[in-house]
Amino acid sequence: MKKYFPYVGLIASIIFLLISCDSLIPGGPNPDETLDGPIDGLSSEEQLQFNRGDAAFAEVFTASNGLGPVFVATSCASCHAGDGKGHPFTTLTRFGQFDSTGNQYLPQGGPQLQHRAIPGYNPESLPAGAPFAKILPPANTGLGFLDAVSDAYIMSNADPNDANGDGISGRSNWVSVPGYLSLRPGTLIVNSKCIGRFGKKGAAYDLLHQTANAYNQDMGISSEYEAIDTYSHQAVTPEVSSETVNDVVFYLKTLKAPIQRNQNDPDVIAGKNIFSMIGCDKCHLLQMQTDYSPIAALSYKTFYPYTDMLLHDMGPGLDDGYTEGFALTSEWKTPPLWGLGLSKISQGGQYYLMHDGRALGIEAAILLHGGESQSSKNAYDLLSGTDQTNLIKFLESL
Ligand SMILES: [Ca+2]
Ligand SMILES: [Ca+2]
Ligand SMILES: [Ca+2]
């Protein structure tokens, strides 16, 4: 018995140290290094709705409050931990093909695999031979800014036929918009379809579309918006209220954009110049502007996401044979690079980049660029070692 006393004392002093260290840092961790706070300038009412959405985002579902019967995970936060990127363990599997020929795996549960089930039900399995893509959860930061950009602004950067001959032909995905969504002012409608701007292939029109689908497809939670159960294929009563879904959407809209660190470091400045010099900024645009937003803090703002929200053919290496809407199997939407250097925090101390996390570092991600980005990648290969290091320092500062 006596033998254990010193350990008790040691543990007690470690706990004491942990508590006292914590209290030395006013206000907790440095806001530059966290992703989960609100944007500046919210009214007190908006802050309350943000808090309600934050709590709902973390809510864990079980069979008793509607989980499943088939599902992928039990809460939004389990895949989007700390609102940062996910880990290969939390990827989604999408399967089949959906383009001009239609998704032939729809009767077999396509396009999303629900590989878990509550007791008494069978989880889905991947049909033999179905093409599939693993999709890593993206960070959820700054999405309100991307939501508040006008369609006209997005289209002004598109060049579907590569009219300027630079080898880059970004285009948008055009998606059917469910009746429960209200369209943004200025929404372009072409053949009854609208520009999709969320999801890695741009399959979701806005954050309500993405969220209602996530409740239904990822957790088996029905709402007034998405009421068809993924197991029975029948309409079921809502398991989450529209108020809660709307709070989560508000939370996503008002999560702050990641804050750049070390932007005055000369190496970081040199790296940013190289980023533009070798054409990375043709897809990862340096800045964008929002249009009018009813949330004042998002209205008419310049922001720095490093994306054009357009689809690009990334070449055979990134072609998994899976597509959505008009997006081809080799096409992916340019991901924002803001927060890139903070992604390891929610990924267990290791980078997992690109749509499925196959790149274990920033350089590995660059080297996987093909198709429209091939010449940018080739230019990277020809840089001096110092220039490559500075470019990566810049990317880590984002
Ligand atoms: Ca359910
Ligand atoms: Ca399914
Ligand atoms: Ca072009």
Image: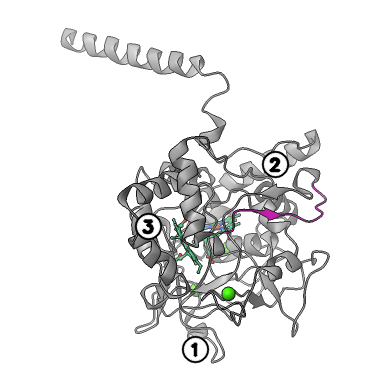
Q: Give the residue type at disc 2.
A: Phe
Q: Is residue 250 left or right of residue 316?
A: right
Above-or-below relation of 214 to 102: above
Q: Secondary structure at mark 3?
A: helix
Q: Residue at x 69, y 52 (%)?
A: 145
Q: Position of residue 202 (x, y in %)?
A: 59, 69
Q: Give the residue type at disc 1.
A: Gln
Q: Nearer the viewer, residue 148 or 235?
A: 148
Q: Which residue is mark 2?
A: 50
Q: Secondary structure at mark 2?
A: helix
Magenta span dominant secondary structure: loop
Q: Which residue is mark 1?
A: 104
Q: Is residue 60 left or right of residue 9?
A: right
Q: Give the residue type at disc 3.
A: Pro
Kindly identify which numbered label has been placed on residue 88: 3
Q: Nearer the viewer, residue 74 or 102?
A: 102
Q: Which circle's residue, 3 or 1, is located before the other in the chain?
A: 3
Q: Is residue 377 visible?
A: yes
**Cα distance, mark 3 to mark 1?**
27 Å
